[in-house]
Amino acid sequence: MILRMRKKAIFTVLVLAAVLAVSFGFAEENKAKARPGETVTVPVTVLANPEQAVAALLKVEYDHEVLELVPSDFVQADTLLLVNLDGIRPGEAGRVSFVLNPEAEMGVQEIRFSAVTARNLEEETVSGPETGAASVIVARAKKPPENQYYSNGTIKQEVDLNSVGNPQQIRYFNRYGKVTRTEESEAWDADGNILRETDYYPYGPSSSHTTYSYTYDEWGNKLTSEATSKEDGTLRSRSEYEYDEYDRRIRSASYDENGELTEVTVYEYGEGNHRTKTTFFNGKGEITGFNVDFVYDENDHIVSYRSLKADGQTKSFTENTWTDKIQVESRTTDPDGKVISREARDPVFGDYLFYDETEESGERYANYYTYYEDTYETDWRSYSGGYRHVMLFTADERRIKETSYSAKPNSEDWTEESVTVYSTDESGNSVSETRSADGSVWISVSDGNGNTLRNTSYGTDGSFSYCCTYEYNSKGQQVRSNWLNEDGTVESYEITEYNSNGEKSKSITRKGDGSFSYGYSYEYDGKGQRIRENNLNEDESIKSFTLYEYNASGNEIRRTNYLADGTVDGFYESEYDESGFKTHSTSYRSDGTKSFEYFYRKLEDGTRQSKRIWYNSDGSVRENGDWQ
């Protein structure tokens, strides 16, 4: 009878779209997780069997493009046979296995079971048992990175794999076919995930090279990322990540070079991988804002969202325009429709064409890009600050020329101030020569690590004005400065020492003949903030000293000058607003009376102004300056 039931069954297939949601309503034990290409087994759970069926043929419904049912004695052609002569009881009644398509995308596949036919112990046809659904979570595939190309067919990313298929080097190319960055991997885990790699920039100083170390969970999700200097191993930043069971990132935390938490982002999701809410926190755990109302296109790109302030009030609206893979335009407006920022990118290479942004303070910045046959130009402008830099680069991203301009704030009546030409000398050092509008010249020479070797200045009439050379230790720290006369003899020099943390601990300046001029020593707290500066005599005894104090944000709020015997010789205090902008500072004489004070402010257009007031020793105002 049971065999006849199998032969007479009508086999149907229902192809289901993958649905990914926060909760699917399945019992926890009815979920299984696997990577593309792997085999996964899910249970068949009976919820109720009111008519005491002892045999039932169930239809198995699933997405055939993602899953392939593994046949067995009780599983054939998308059907499953359940048999229990004592009655099919609630609970797990069987299991089915599937092979995931090697090309399956991350997400969740729903599997449903429904009775086609059923019999009781008397071989009468009865209603089949009620069964629960199951789901397969498709985890991240174990795929090494592959070569990538721009839409015009030119190479964008080139990957070299080692003998076991792990990526050992990845090279990134710009629109001109030049390598702009190289990642060299040094260690991998058993799944081929990169554990440590170093970024190299062909034309950048060695100090710019960064080593990244990673950790992962069992499904290949990155848990931590730590960036350190390739040169000296010092920490630059650290990030930590958390995921839900569907491999969606739900939390990220960022730490600075001191290991202190700077920001946290929490992500919430609805259907699929579509985000519904992002919450931002500062390092103190305080909410700083939200992103909500996300809208996605058919390619799962975010096309719009709304940003909220910490109090929930709307801050801005952002709209994005995409090609297949590149976000070519983005526009952000305030609640009144005023444009806050806008940007555009090249649809082929993804390079910036321009971006323009106005901060809450009113400060406005912009950068415009122009691409030529074998060079490109950036035009960076601070409208509120009244300065502009136009820079020309070679195809391999080496700067060859920079022209600087000035203007009144929020004016585009630019006046050329200087032109700098960049080149390389016969020793391979970088040379920059700046000619100002008044005719003066400044020449600077730097080595391949970005360390300045020599600065030379000439006056408006071409006469010698200044020259200084610099020397460094193996750590790249400047240990000697030589001020030279026009004939190259040493007029004076400074010797600098550092503590074990790399902080300047002492500097002594001497005349060319070696006689003492002046010297200082320095002390720091655990945060690297200078807390004491000692003015030294020739025998390095203390002549006078200054103590520094800071607020919780690291802004200097007081410096007090002392004579060698500890007598106060004046002090200086500063005040700041919540954003860290200095609003007021006051200088006091040794008797506590005011010497002068400064007031600072930002105008609506972003312009910064200050005014100074001078005081007589009796406290009366000697001069009250204007805002400027």
Image (cartoon, helix red, strand yellow):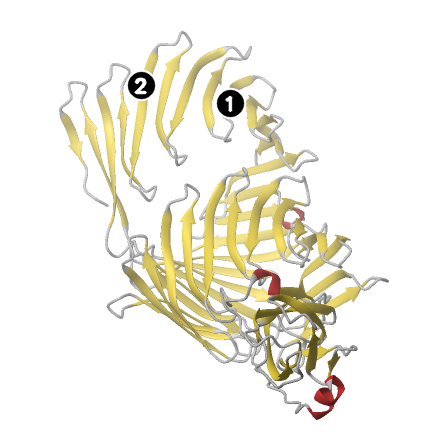
Residue 157, quarter of the rendered image: bottom right
Seen as rendered, the residue at the extreme front is 122
Secondary structure at badge 2 equals strand
* Mark 2 Cα shell of 10 Å, populated few (<14), some (14-19), many (≥20): many
Pick the residue in front: 565 or 555. Answer: 555
* Circle 1: residue type: Tyr
Q: Does residue 145 sit above or below 116 in this rendering?
A: above
- Looking at the image, residue 571 sits to the left or right of residue 391; the answer is left
* Circle 2: residue type: Gly
- Looking at the image, residue 98 sits to the left or right of residue 470; the answer is right
Q: Position of residue 236 (x, y in %)?
A: 58, 44
- Looking at the image, residue 306 sits to the left or right of residue 132; the answer is left
Query: Which mark identifies residue 522?
Result: 1
Q: Identify the residue shown where x is 48% and y is 75%.
A: 328
Q: Position of residue 437 (x, y in %)?
A: 42, 56
Seen as rendered, the residue at the extreme left is 620
Q: Position of residue 257 (x, y in %)?
A: 55, 41
Q: Does residue 438 sit above or below 373 in this rendering?
A: above
Seen as rendered, the residue at the extreme top is 565
Please give the residue where the numbered disc 2 appears in the rendered image: 570
Q: Identify the residue shown where x is 28% and y is 15%.
A: 590
Number of marks present in the image shown: 2
Q: Position of residue 628 (x, y in %)?
A: 24, 45
- Looking at the image, residue 420 sits to the left or right of residue 363; the answer is right
